[in-house]
């Protein structure tokens, strides 16, 4: 029986080493490559065609959400299982929207990641139950508090794009992106990226 071929994408070398040891201890799995960010993950998917990518969400440069979208578009036979420290329902929803087949918390038991990889390879989904949703809701803040440009910036932030990527997409400077982000935070009273993601989802800025 052929083994499940896996690529590990995480910016921490120590974690990649631990994941490699865990995965290669399984008789039906092998690690075919590693990547330290989303750009490298996509390049190695193109070259290695892994069955499953274990993807961290927050990496320098191109993050896991953008990389997941790219991989699902360019390498449709490769499944993505998100492995993250972000215990928030908003991240589960954004991972689903990006095309991930699984979502596992880093604090979960190692056996859950293995189950998620097997499920993804078999064409099934495996999404961990996260903690309770944040008490503070964002839906009460009106969308018309922000300008059309700020709305564009917010959408791209929620999709996981970096300031550099947003600047390139909107043909503005990184400084302008930072200014728009500061205005969004001030006007909407949002403090964390999870808050921004929830707001974008709840106000229809991201297609569900």
Image (tube, rainbow, N blue to C red):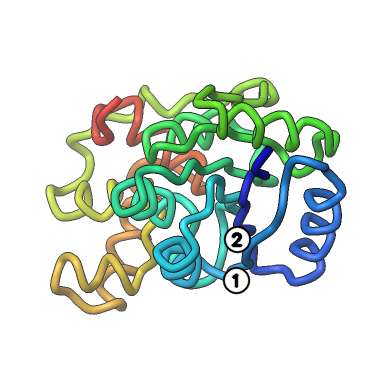
Q: Percent x, y for residue 7?
A: 60, 57
Mark 2: give few (<14), some (14-19) or many (20+) Cα within 10 Å.
many
Say which element carries label 1. loop
> Which residue does the image show at 13% across and 73% down from the upper left?
171
> Which residue does the image show at 24% across and 71% down from the upper left?
167
Q: CA distance from mark 2 to mark 1?
A: 6 Å
**Labels 2 and 1 touching (C-beta < 8 A):** yes
Q: Percent x, y for residue 88?
A: 60, 33
Mark 1: give few (<14), some (14-19) or many (20+) Cα within 10 Å.
some
Q: Which mark is residue 2?
A: none
> Which residue does the image show at 60% across and 53% down from the upper left?
56
Q: Is residue 128 left or right of residue 200?
A: right
Residue 170 visible in the shown view: yes
The quadrant holding residue 141 is: top left
Q: Percent x, y for residue 132?
A: 66, 20
Q: Is residue 88 left or right of residue 196?
A: right
Residue 186 visible in the shown view: no
Q: How many marks?
A: 2
> Which residue does the image show at 57% across and 58% down from the upper left?
58
Mark positioned earlier in the residue sequence (2 or 1) = 2
User: Mark 2 highlights which residue?
Assistant: 9
Question: Who is closer to the viewer here, 30 or 188?
Answer: 30
As displayed, is residue 15 above or below residue 160?
below
Q: Percent x, y for residue 13?
A: 75, 71
Quarter placement of the N terminus = top right
User: Mark 1 highlights which residue?
Assistant: 36
Question: Who is closer to the viewer here, 87 or 119?
Answer: 119
């Amino acid at each position: 029986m052929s083994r499940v071929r896996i690529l590990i994408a995480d910016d921490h070398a120590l974690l990649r080493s631990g994941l490699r040891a865990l995965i290669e201890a399984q008789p039906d799995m092998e690690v075919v490559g590693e990547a330290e960010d989303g750009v490298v993950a996509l390049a190695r998917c193109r070259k290695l065609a892994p069955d499953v990518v274990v993807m961290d969400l927050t990496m320098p440069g191109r993050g896991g959400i953008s990389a997941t979208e790219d991989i699902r578009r360019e390498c449709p036979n490769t499944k993505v299982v998100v492995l993250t420290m972000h215990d928030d329902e908003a991240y589960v929803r954004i991972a689903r929207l990006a095309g991930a087949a699984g979502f596992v918390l880093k604090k979960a038991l190692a056996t859950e990641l293995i189950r998620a990889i097997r499920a993804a390879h078999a064409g099934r989904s495996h999404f961990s139950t996260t903690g309770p949703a944040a008490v503070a809701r964002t839906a009460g803040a009106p969308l018309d508090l922000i300008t059309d440009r700020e709305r564009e910036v917010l959408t791209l932030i929620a999709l996981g794009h970096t300031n550099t990527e947003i600047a390139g997409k909107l043909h503005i400077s990184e400084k302008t992106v930072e200014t728009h982000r500061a205005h969004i935070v001030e006007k909407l009273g949002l403090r964390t990226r999870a808050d921004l993601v929830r707001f974008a989802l709840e106000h229809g800025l991201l297609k569900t």
